[in-house]
Image (spheres, rainbow, N blue to C red):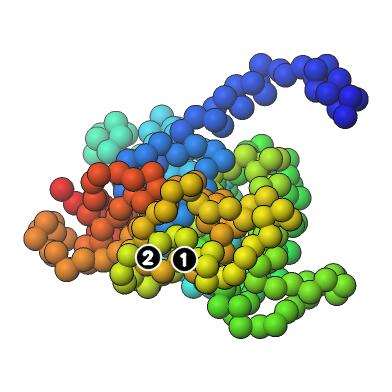
Amino acid sequence: MGSHAKSWLLEHETAREMLERVQAERPFLLLPPLHRVPIRVGNVVELAGPSSSSKTHILIQAAITCILPKQWNGVSYGGLGHSAMFIDLDCRFDISRFSELLNHRIMEAGSSSKVGCHKMESEAQFARMEHYNEELFALCMKRFLYTRCYDSSEFLATLKTLHYRLQKERQAHGLNVHLLLIDSIGAFHWLDRGSSSFSLEGDNRKSWHLQNVSEAVVQEIRRLLLVHPMLVMATKAVALGNKYSTNELTRSYGKWPAADNQYSRNVTSTDQKLPYREYMPAVWQSFVTHRILVRDTDDDSVNDEHPNNSVFLLEWLMPPVNSLDKFTVTNTGVFILS
């Protein structure tokens, strides 16, 4: 312990390391509808909502904002200029849709820049802009890291080896991963709950159950954040109904040994009312720092600009925000409705 403290005191931080650390601790400037609350590296944001409520589209928009540069070749793109890691547990990620939205953001920024305002006086200028767009698209796609998992054992194995992959990417491209996206965190919950136990590949000595799988997932993400500071965003499919207490989860799942598990406390010290029945274990609930509810609505009165698109509501549950954001999803992205 003493040698560890001494080595920490003797460690000197370079100016570049200090700037990288300070910039990493600054709030993320995410696009609407995630603009109400400042989100920082280290936060865990949960997007809860029923199926087909555009949760994945919100993750995609956040990922595109992360991988786009702030400025490139004199054009402002409003991105963060970092890499993003997308873990697909739902196994329905549409890469063509992602590419389409990324291309639109690139072309939209180019057309609104000073270069675009010159009306492309020559074919050479137009060809040069197309080359810039293709080059930037390829650059951004290199920053987007994707993996797919088909069960909890694959998910845990991915988390355990993710440090080495992120380290390799940082050495190859000189960029840190600032966004970890998980779609969807409860994909294997009911399967794991229904099975008696299973073993991880290469670890046949330990039987895994729903409780220790959730504990291991949270533990691995915590360890990962210590080495690679990131913002974590995870979607979760829920069925909306009456308001339920978060304390109901502890009662329905029995007693969790708090002495053996430092994460087995509830989300908050107060009893939070949710418009859906919570099914994720308390270890995950306590890990979440921000919770958002997304749902669709039949109110099309404010959707005059996009009459053929559904309208969705976004509500901040934790921390609570006294306003609801209405938004729609089009072929070009997510848009807030006034």
Residue 133 in view, yes or no: no
Whole-angstrom CA distance, mark 2 to mark 1, is: 7 Å
| Residues under numbered marks 2 and 1 in contact, where contact means CB atoms less than 8 Å apart | yes
Residue in the picture at 49% in, 37% down: 40
Crowd rating for badge 1 (residues with CA inside 10 Å; few <14, some 14–19, many 20+): some
**Callout 2 amino acid:** Tyr
Q: The N terminus lies in which quarter of the figure?
A: top right
Please indicate, yes or no, whether residue 170 appears anywhere in the rendered image. yes
The image quarter in which residue 9 lies: top right
Foreground residue, 5 or 270?
A: 270
**Mark number, residue 33:** none
Q: Is residue 92 left or right of residue 172?
A: left
Q: Residue at x 26, y 58 (%)?
A: 313
- Up-down relation of residue 56 to residue 338 (above or below): below
Helix, strand or loop at label 1? It is helix
Q: Categorize mark 2 by other alpha carbons within 10 Å: few (<14), some (14-19), many (20+).
A: some
Read off the residue under disc 1.
248
Q: Which three-letter amino acid code belongs to the residue tagged 1?
A: Glu
Residue hosting label 2: 244
Spot occupied by residue 10 in the image (x, y as percentages of width and height): 83, 16
